[in-house]
Amino acid sequence: MNTAIIINITYVFSAILFIYGLKELSSPATARRGNFISSLGMFIAVVVTLFSQGIIEYQWILLGVVVGGIIGALAARMVAMTAMPEMVALFNGFGGLASLLVGLAAFDPKIVSQFSAAAIFLSVFIGGVTFTGSFIAWGKLSEKITSNPIMFTGQQIVNAILLLGLLAAGVLLISNPSLNNDYLWIVIVLSLLLGIMFVIPIGGGDMPVVISLLNSYSGLAACAAGFAINNLLLIVAGSLVGASGIILTQIMCKAMNRSLSNVLFSGFGSPKTAKGEIEGTVKPIIAEDAFYILEAASSVLIIPGYGMAVAQAQHIVKELQELLEANGAEVVYGVHPVAGRMPGHMNVLLAEADVSYDVLLEMEAVNPRIENFDVAIVIGANDVVNPAAREDESSPLYGMPIVNADLARTVFVLKRSMASGFAGVENPLFFKENVRMLFGDAKESISQLVREFDQ
């Protein structure tokens, strides 16, 4: 059996690991194992690729492995769960940059064919957009820049000019790569600019969709890079990431009842003039009084949001769940698909606290029975429980499916203040007759409830 056959068999084995690992990622219960299996597949593929290319000097490769391994280990251990969306955005960006650099390195005007030039163009184009777009998403998520859409007159025209310029440079590059290699640098510059212009008009409320879309872009860029260097495994891996990212993006859009074009071009999240003052009175409650209501409850729905991540309250929430269950109450979680700032954010947090996957219910499962819950506890969630999405046609959230928390018999909302959510939209839930506001840090508020049960 010659070397080429062994390499191809190994690539097939790695591809099988990718596919099986991706399947395991579909469930929180198996996601960690799926991540490990996929990583193992990539490690095997990298090692075999290095041997197949006859690389003898490994000093720089080993240095990259050590540096990258240290950065990855520190990121996994030190990055807070609240910063996980930002880290995912950065990883997407670096994936795009890697594809851009592969395309740039693969371009040799003396031997490159038109097909390879086309693949290189796509790798550089999509990689550049992914790189700068992801860094803008990181800035919005980390609030280094405003999370509101940044819009100006003629913005769509500017974006159209950039895109047309990219396509024109690409056509000229592909038509005769040996003569038009300078156009590759034009493609790089314009793609980096387009990535910035692509993300700045998107508001913070749509960042979960943007992250999943940019993740798809990073996969498509890797797929194009695979064609550029004629590596079948890179094509397979990039295709898997690209396809799964598109599917996830569609799921996110469906969860918000909006089209992808509406997310990308509507400027959602920009400041709007209020229709009028929200009628009603905020009714605060203290932990001791909330305890007596919870003690008498036979069913409790917990609705987590980004505020739970900020307070790092997932472990104490699990402790409260166990106390309520010991008291005879049914406790389940209502998890909205876009709660938090990245897809699956709440699932990751609750999995970290060893909350059973059986009690993590999707929005569609809890809404039909919401009126039968004695208490709904909203922990740091805002936009995903905002009844304006159901009641107010002038609201930018109107039509977005929400967890109908306001229909529970009693609602406790745990918040630091009356500030609006990440989308910047006021929430009439706080003024409903059956709603009580438990102000303060979510972790401390729930700790007080736990102490009341212990006493």
Image: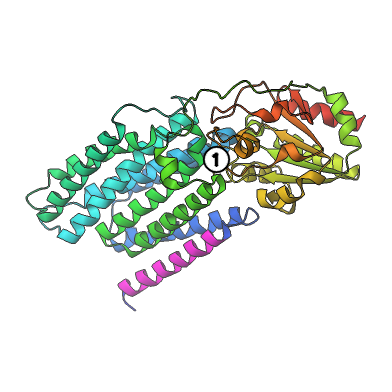
Q: Nearer the viewer, residue 191 or 407?
A: 407
Query: What percent of the width, then of the height, locates residue 187?
Result: 21, 43
Query: What percent of the width, then of the height, locates residue 449?
Result: 83, 29
Please name the residue shown 52% across and 59% down the image: 22
Residue highlighted by disc 1: 76
Asked if one can make out residue 67 in the rendered structure from this viewpoint, the answer is no
Of all residues, the one furthest to the bottom in this rendering is: 1
Query: What percent of the width, then of the height, locates residue 346?
Result: 63, 42
Label 1: few (<14), some or many (≥20) within 10 Å? Answer: few
Please name the residue shown 87% across and 25% down the image: 289
Q: Give left or right: position of 227 versus 372.
A: left
Where does the C terminus fall, quadrant-wise?
top right
Q: Give left or right: position of 442 versus 39.
A: right
Q: Is residue 25 magenta?
A: no
Q: Give left or right: position of 118 versus 236.
A: left
Q: Is residue 15 magenta?
A: yes
Where does the N terminus fall, quadrant-wise?
bottom left
Q: Give left or right: position of 12 versus 111.
A: right
Of all residues, the one furthest to the left in this rendering is: 179
Residue 383's place in the image compared with 92, above or below, is above
Residue 227's place in the image compared with 267, above or below, is below
Magenta-highlighted residues: 3-23
Asked if one can make out residue 416 in the rendered structure from this viewpoint, the answer is yes
Q: How many marks?
A: 1
Task: Give the main secondary structure of the magenta stretch.
Answer: helix
Please name the residue shown 50% across and 45% down the image: 258
Q: Nearer the viewer, residue 128 or 20?
A: 128
Query: What percent of the width, then of the height, locates residue 175?
Result: 11, 55
Residue type at mark 1: give it.
Ala
Colouring: rainbow
